[in-house]
Amino acid sequence: MAQLLRVTHDTFIPLERTTMVAAGKTETTDLERWIKDCPQLIDDTLLVVTNQFGSWAAANDDAARERPDVLALSTSGELVVMELKRDGDRRIHLQAITYGALVAGFTKETLAQAHADWLARERDERISAEEALERLTAHVDSQWNDELLTLPRLLLVAEHFPAQVLTTVQWLATAAPAITIECHEYQLFRDTDGLCVSFQRLFPVDTLENRRLRPAVTAAANETSEQVATNRRRARSAKLIVEHDLIPAGALMTLELGGVSRPEVKAQVDAWLTENPDRARITWVNDPIRPLVWAVEPDKTWTPSALRNTIFARAGAPEPNFSAGDTWCYLGRTLWWIASEVEDASDV
């Protein structure tokens, strides 16, 4: 059980535990809004796509009543279904599984349309479905295709979890390993200044963070699950590098395409970069999500995949289909290589 202590220069005041009910807070008005506005509370790789989505194509009205609380996209390319509860609920995992089955039918195009509709409704921001797709694609830091959307991650968020929920989730991790379910618990605290909220992942435990059990159902499911696992690791490259200070701020980065692009594509991109010195000047900043600064647009930070995609588009090259972490280099070593050394060391 978490405890919070407010510390000033000469006093230490324990914060009083409270509950959503006692504080007069609700799932949709409060908890959902906290996570929509700050998805990093749960996972700093998430981009909210939509909430309370209910536009299902169905021959009856049953599906129309199903509305996932929050639908997000991870930098690994996975859809993430969040089911939120104000206290505890013995059926939270069953609802999440139903929502997971529904959203597994998304394509990149239908997901982009849902995101564009949500931005218009929620943020009063009008963009086309094509622009929304560009934003979603830029967020993903690995190869992204419709197959990845068929294995959404289920993320349960509750004030506490009944024992039967945790037992079922642990059993599913073994019995149905293609389904990834996480349990995140939150707690409220009160003091004279108001409320504080803490979030922590309860399952799986941190030591199993990179574990992805492989399904034995079909070869196709196994291949997709393998790609998800690889994408998760690649998407964490920048975060690991920043956490361990493996690349100094201001270091020059290079885009090395040998071995991942066709020779004619590599030549086309390299020629475009060398036409203007600013095009090839990319530097590193200590940001776990957007660690690159491009001299062409120096006031903006980029994810590795977004900058790679932009460079390819402006050079008139075909859309890239390889991991950005395998091409951005510091002193001849790729982001994936640098980060993997840290992960390998942690496994020893």
Image (cartoon, grey):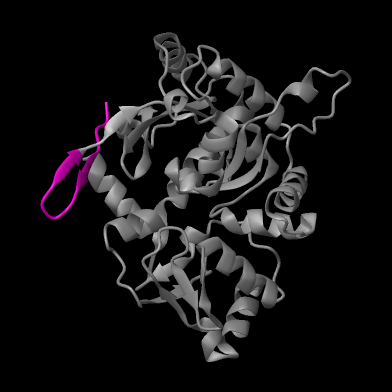
Determine if residue 223 is in view: no
Query: Where is residue 231 shown, x and y percent of the image?
Result: 50, 46
Q: Does the segment drawn in magenta span residue 5?
A: yes
**Majority SS type along the magenta span:** loop
Residue farthest to the bottom? 276
Residue at image coords 59%, 46%: 48
- Left or right of residue 93, residue 163 in this image: left
Locate the C terminus by quadrant: top left
Q: Which quadrant of the figure has residue 107?
A: top right
Answer above or below: position of 202 versus 44: above
- In the image, residue 347 above or below residue 92: below
The structure residue drawn at horizontal position 50% and vertical position 25%, both measured from the top left corner, is 86
Q: Which image quadrant for residue 5? A: top left
Question: So how many labels did they put on this image?
Answer: 0
Residue 116: give x, y in percent of width and height: 74, 51
Query: Which residue is nearer to you in this view: 88 or 290?
Result: 88
Is residue 318 covered in magenta? no
**Extreme residue in the front direction:** 192
Q: Nearer the viewer, residue 260 or 93?
A: 93
Residue 100 location in percent, x, y? Answer: 63, 27
First to last magenta residue range: 1-13
Q: Residue furthest left?
A: 10
* Residue at 79% over, 24% down: 64
